[in-house]
Amino acid sequence: MIELVDLSYVHMGTPDPEESARWARDIYGLEEVGRENGRVYLRGDDRNHNVCYFRGDPGDHTVGIAVADDAALEAAASHLEAGGVAVAWGDAEGAAVRRCMRYLTFRDPTGNSFDLVVRPFHSGRRFFPSRDAGIYWFNHIGLKTSDAPRDEKFWCGLFNFRTNDWIGDAPLMSFDKVHHRFALFPTDHAGVQHINFQVRETDDIMRSSYFLQDRQVRIVFGPGRHATSGARFLYFEGPDGMVFEYSCGVRMIEPEDDWRPRQFPFTNESFCVWGSRPDVPEFRE
Ligand SMILES: [Fe+2]
């Protein structure tokens, strides 16, 4: 079993890193923390970075997930290879780009690209954005899957992921107390489906819903409340059509809660108990 300890980052290709970073900073409310070799690094919490834009194919997404130390990374490599998953060890140059000590790369059965990292850099400085959207934590991602039960088995079999709820075939999975760190949404190709940062409170979500409307940002779902995690949410379109989310109040599941995963039907009501209707292909009934 590979013990994941954190969700670290998403690196994304974009035709225009400057413009994508401007949106992430001035509209979404992340803090730009550095530029190197045409890459722009941004963050929404106290860690080194959670988002990195580089000049490239907007379909090129890599998700960084962390294990505790070198021994765990070496054990993970053996475990993945024994499971028939090809791994490629990263070099010092790649580690510098990822801002971590060591890493390896692999793909899930759909073809999504992952970095398994050791000791991703921290900053030692408070997160301090130029727009106060209320963001404080890079929390979870939606991932596209071409076969949700197969990929659920991949993550829950090889890694310490467990499913906390399902909406139809879509598992909402976690490796820690957060209700979901990965949510797998069925479609026919690989990619990150949405990127979530937590905000402090419902007021932040409502304030941003007007801020975004004023700036003609396409809101694709919400404001609403998820039946599964209980989080209040707002989804909207960022650079290159990527869906970004703000949410607050995501359910935390403690070991003593004795949680059993619940099955929800794949309906609008399972995604939003307030009655908002999604304009997101992967969420549509
Ligand atoms: Fe989400």
Image (spheres, rainbow, N blue to C red):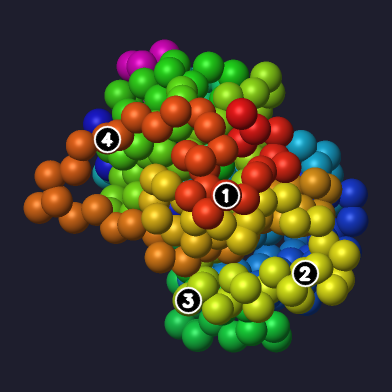
What separation in Å lies between label 4 and label 3 (alpha carbons)?
A: 26 Å
Instruction: Tell which circle, 4 or 2, labels the residue nearer the N-terminal end.
Output: 2
Q: Could you say which is closer to the camera, residue 63 or residue 213? A: 213
Instruction: Tell which circle, 1 or 4, labels the residue nearer the N-terminal end.
Output: 4
Kind of residue sitting beneath label 1 = Gly
Residue position for label 1: 275
Instruction: Tell which circle, 1 or 2, labels the residue nearer the N-terminal end.
Output: 2
What separation in Å lies between label 3 and label 1 (alpha carbons)?
A: 23 Å
Question: Is residue 176 rendered magenta in the image?
Answer: no
The percent position of residue 24, horizontal first and vertical second, equals 74, 67
The percent position of residue 93, horizontal first and vertical second, equals 63, 52
Q: Is residue 32 visible?
A: yes
Kind of residue sitting beneath label 2 = Leu
Label 1 crowding class (10 Å Cα cut-off): few <14, some 14-19, many 20+?
Answer: some
Instruction: Tell which circle, 4 or 3, labels the residue nearer the N-terminal end.
Output: 3
Q: Kindly indicate the quadrant of the structure image that contains residue 79.
A: top left
Residue position for label 2: 212
Residue at position x 47%, y 39% in the image: 270
Q: Is residue 35 visible?
A: no
What separation in Å lies between label 1 and label 4 (alpha carbons)?
A: 23 Å
For the N terminus, give its image quadrant: top left
For the C terminus, give its image quadrant: top right
**Residue 147 numbered mark, or none:** none
Q: Secondary structure at mark 1?
A: loop
Front disc: 1 or 2: 1
Q: Secondary structure at mark 4?
A: loop
Q: Could you say which is closer to the camera, residue 101 or residue 226? A: 226
Front disc: 3 or 1: 1
Residue position for label 4: 261
The magenta segment: 80-84
